[in-house]
Amino acid sequence: MKFLHLAAGVAAISLLASCGGGGSSSGGGSSSSSSSSSGGMSLQLDNVRSLLKTNADIAFAAYSDAVDTAVDLQTALTTFKNNPTQENLDAAKIAWLVAREPYGQTEVYRFRLSPIDSTDYQNEDGPEGDINAWPLGEALIDYTISGTDFGPDQTDVTSHTTGVNFPTENIINSSVAIDANLIAKTATAADEHDVISGYHAIEFMLWGQDLNLDGSADTEASREASTVDSNGLLTSGGHRPLTDFTTDVNASRRHLFMEVVAAKLIEDLTSVRDGWATGASYRTAFTTINSETEALQKLAEVLTGMGTLSEGELAGERMQIAFSSNSQEDEHSCFSDNTHRDIWLNAEGVSNSYFGEYAGYDSTLDGTDNENARAVSGYGFDDLLADMNQTSLAAQMHAALSDTEDGYISIDSEARAGSPVDVLIMDANRNNTNPMYATIIALNAQSAIISDIADALGITAAVVDDNASGCNTTNPNQSCE
């Protein structure tokens, strides 16, 4: 659990400060014959090389775990197709939830032209949209029900290139060929409501819409509280009937759709993982520095992923839009009610980069990382700041990460106790003591410290993209533009 790690880290920094700072930390800070002055501090190039190597090692480990768990999901889907029982449907759902655990921690590698966003370190043409785009174009994929939170503004189809005669048809109830060519057209979707690929397409097929217990889509004022069933699944997500995969006239097309989407998901994740492998052109370019200018550029890339994910993407796009508007459609994993894990894992990815550590992932869905064969412990920003005698700045960052961690642990605990994120964002629950509110504020503060770290290092470029969202994350109740 990172909580204990952070608590120990704060204590260590306090001790370091009381002792006057300095020295190498547990990550193994190295000295270097190559040093230069940056932002008034001494920047050791060998230390930066260690940080970049650790950052790359974590990326390769986490994406490798993402590929493996996606393959496990594919296997579970095949088992379900061959023997479509409720037990195998539940097993496929669990495989989907487990697959999200390592992937969620990789999202800190976005916003920096790494292989998830770029194929050549220059253009934003990477497969991220095909892997994790949301909201989803569920109405284009399969049947949906309209209601207070599932109106045309949420589930309508704006334009698409699938060949489906929407709205009288969708992909499942038409004769359009379900193949790799169809799914690849997501990349050209003109609107998020036309997205048909990635994790959330499979999520929608497995769970269906998250409707009320009466089967209606009138969810703005009344949503299901959660319990955990004997399989460890929250019972508050969608309730797609097993008959959709057995006796329904389109049952075979649903199995085929998931089969094709899963194959593309694995292909895309594999391409990203391979970009981080030792000897790969991207990894070599990322980890190679020969001057202070190059060192600062690479540190800026890492900090941009941390800062922009913290504030614009996670606090804004993934939390405040849903929180301020009570929009179930805008919560990240709205079909499975797994948004509490998305928040936890994205935030954990930022702390992974800061501490230079990756603990693995949770395969039992109890909130504790237990699959640690690829765990990484190396040189992080905590080590770099310690070696540069920046103990005060490090203490501020530790405190900020600890506040964020308190928030996402509370959100996770609320979900496990009966109030998933779609309940937390309801109008009746929107107040300053809501852990969603507190976590948005904490992520905003965290991003400010990340900017301060960049300033202290002498990085002149902004590492928190102000245009990443239209949200004022200092006021979570305020609607986003």
Image: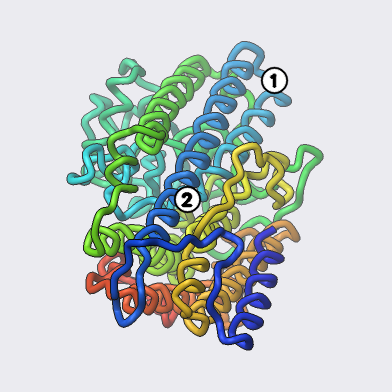
Which label belongs to residue 54?
Answer: 2
Q: Is residue 161 above or below residue 179?
A: below
Element assignment for label 2: helix
Q: Could you tell me residue 124's position as x and y percent?
A: 22, 46
Specify the quadrant that holds the N terminus. bottom right
SS class, disc 1: loop
x, y percentage for residue 58? 50, 46
Q: In which quarter of the view is residue 318 placed?
A: bottom left
Q: Is residue 302 left or right of residue 427?
A: left
At a point 25% along the width and 54% down the height, the residue shown is 290
Q: Residue furthest left?
A: 123
- Disc sitting over residue 459 in the figure: none
Query: Between 78 and 70, which is closer to the camera in this rendering?
Result: 70
Amino acid under label 2? Thr
The vertical placement of 387 against 133, above or below, is below
Q: Residue at x 21, y 30 (%)?
A: 161
Q: In the rendered image, which quarter is residue 418 located in?
A: bottom right
Q: Quadrant of residue 242?
A: top right
* Residue position for label 1: 85
Q: Residues within 10 Å of mark 1 (few under 14, many from 20)?
A: some
Give the x, y percent position of residue 314: 44, 62
Residue 54 percent location from the top left of the image: 47, 50
In the picture, the quarter occupied by the C terminus is bottom left
Nearest the eye: 71 or 94: 71
> N-terminal of the two: label 1 or label 2?
2
Task: Give left or right: position of 436 versus 390.
Answer: right
- Is any atom of residue 139 visible in this view? no
Scheme of colours in the image? rainbow
The residue located at (55%, 73%) in the rendering is 23
C-alpha gap between disc 1 and disc 2: 44 Å
Direction right: furthest residue: 230
Give the amino acid at mark 1: Thr
